[in-house]
Image: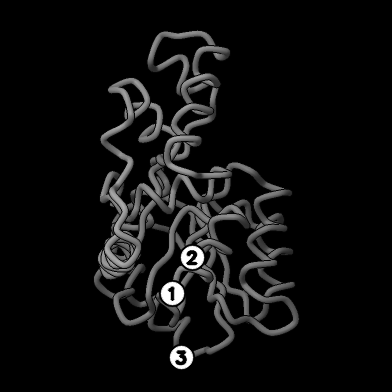
Amino acid sequence: MSIRVLLADDHGVVRKGLRFLLDRQPGVEIVGEAADGREAVRLAEAADPDIVVIDIAMPLLNGIEATAQIVRRSPKVGVIILSMHSDEDYLLSALNAGAKGYLLKDSAEEDLVRAIQAVHKGTPFFSPEIAKTMLEDYMRFLQQRNLQDSYDLLTEREKEVLQLLAEGKSNKEAATILDVSVNTLDTHRTHLMQKLDLHNTAEIVLYAVRKKIIA
């Protein structure tokens, strides 16, 4: 079956460009286009897409807030945010809103199809430039404070849990994959978050991006 995609961007030229790119891809079907954030939320319910590709800067309702509403109403929809911003604050806001992908607009032509395929399979996707920038910023942070990366303090099991959670698996799904109880999984999650000074799932994903644990 085709991957059903909703495009949301307030610039008609951009939407046409994205549509032209995706229309050439077998297995991808465009099911709607939105020119503002509120329309994107409405169409995400009405058109039943698998993937929503949305600009971060949308009129009437910005892309971050629209993403939060879309995910809250339709948790199975994978949202990919298009953005001009590569700094961590925007990425963290996108992840907290429930986005599964974050693409820089200047790399969308190269990465959009791969992003759609990855997110449709349940795997988060970020522009390679995002991962590179996050890693460089993180290493600079450690060097400036004469700190060491705490990743090596994790046990092998905690590293496995970290990757599964960063890939978007729920605690129950991760426990099933690792053949452990949910309580045991929760214990591993708590320990790894304490060791890495992480506080929520969005920060887990962000850390995994920095470490290139996920693309």
Query: Residue 129's mark?
Result: none
Residue 62 left/right relative to 114? right
- Compared with 186, 53 (above or below) is below
Expressed as whole percent of the image width and height from the top left, the position of residue 157 reads 33, 20
In this view, the residue in front, 21 or 71, is 71
Expressed as whole percent of the image width and height from the top left, the position of residue 175 reads 47, 17
Is residue 111 at all visible to an observer of this figure?
Answer: no
Expressed as whole percent of the image width and height from the top left, the position of residue 169 reads 47, 32
Residue at which label 3 appears: 13
Rendered-image quadrant of the N terminus: top left
Q: Say whether marks 2 and 1 touch (CB < 8 Å).
A: yes
Instruction: Report helix, strand or loop for mark 1.
Output: loop
Residue depicted at x 72% and y 76%: 61
Query: Residue 91's mark?
Result: 2
Residue depicted at x 56% and y 75%: 56
Instruction: Report helix, strand or loop for mark 2.
Output: helix
Count residues near mark 2 (Cα–Cα under 10 Å), then give few for <14, some for 14-19, many for 20+.
many
| Mark positioned earlier in the residue sequence (1 or 3) | 3
* Nearer mark to the viewer, of 2 and 3: 2
Q: CA distance from mark 1 to mark 3?
A: 26 Å
Number of labels in the image equals: 3
- Compared with 31, 121 (above or below) is above
Residue depicted at x 45% and y 14%: 176
Q: CA distance from mark 2 to mark 1?
A: 7 Å
Query: Residue 87's mark?
Result: 1
